[in-house]
Image (cartoon, rainbow, N blue to C red):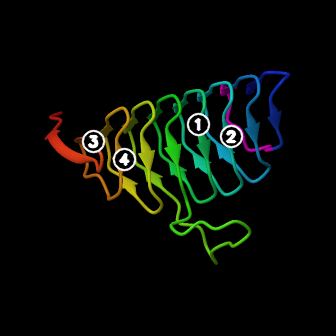
Amino acid sequence: MPKIHPLADVKSANIGKDTRIWQFSVVFDGAIIGENCNICAHTLVENGVTVGNNVTIKSGVFLWEGTVVADNVFIGPNATFTNDAMPRSKVYPQAFSGITIKQGASIGANATILPGVVIGEEAMVGAGAVVVADVPDRAVVVGNPAKVIRYLTK
């Protein structure tokens, strides 16, 4: 059974066992969150978002429609996700361009991920990076725009 703080607004019934959702978090009814996750305070998980098992989402993270987060992912505080390449007030795309974070990847604090980007397995995005293109498996990326500085070995 999930553990949901009484000051969280959780509408979804699709929350896995042993997942913890802390105060001032909002989870829409169409969100799916796996088992043994830690969703920290001041977060938002919108409709059409899927979060795998053993995921940590630190404070200040908003996951927008179309985002897919695989198992064992870490998302650092205030990482910014986007899903609309040409945002305008009250003008919506036919479909949002979700972000995909693959198994075991880590996103550093204050990183910004642009719409449609795929972060590869076991990849690491450095704090403050601005990710404008897909990140290969096990790559470490930093900077603005984010560039590969090395690859992790197993």
Q: Amino acid under label 4?
A: Val
* Residue that mark 3 sits on: 143
Asked whether, in this view, residue 120 is left or right of residue 8, the answer is left
- Residue 85's spot in the image, x, y percent? 50, 67
Q: Amino acid at mark 3?
A: Gly
Identify the residue shown where x is 67% and y is 36%: 16
Residue position for label 1 = 61
Q: CA distance from mark 4 to mark 2?
A: 21 Å
Dot 1 or dot 2: first in sequence order is 2
User: From which residue to which does the magenta span run?
Assistant: 12-20
x and y percentages locating residue 41 in the rendered image: 68, 24
Label 4 SS: strand
Pointer 1 local density, CA inside 10 Å: few below 14, some 14–19, many at least 20: many
Q: Amino acid at mark 1?
A: Val
Q: Are marks 1 and 2 in contact (CB under 8 Å)?
A: yes
Q: Residue 113, position in %: x, y?
A: 44, 50
Q: Who's the residue at 32% across and 50% down the image? A: 120
The residue beneath circle 4 is 130
Q: Which mark is residue 44?
A: 2
The answer to the question of whether label 2 and label 3 lie on touching residues, with beta carbons closer than 8 A, is no
Q: Magenta part mainly helix, strand or loop?
A: loop
SS at badge 1: loop
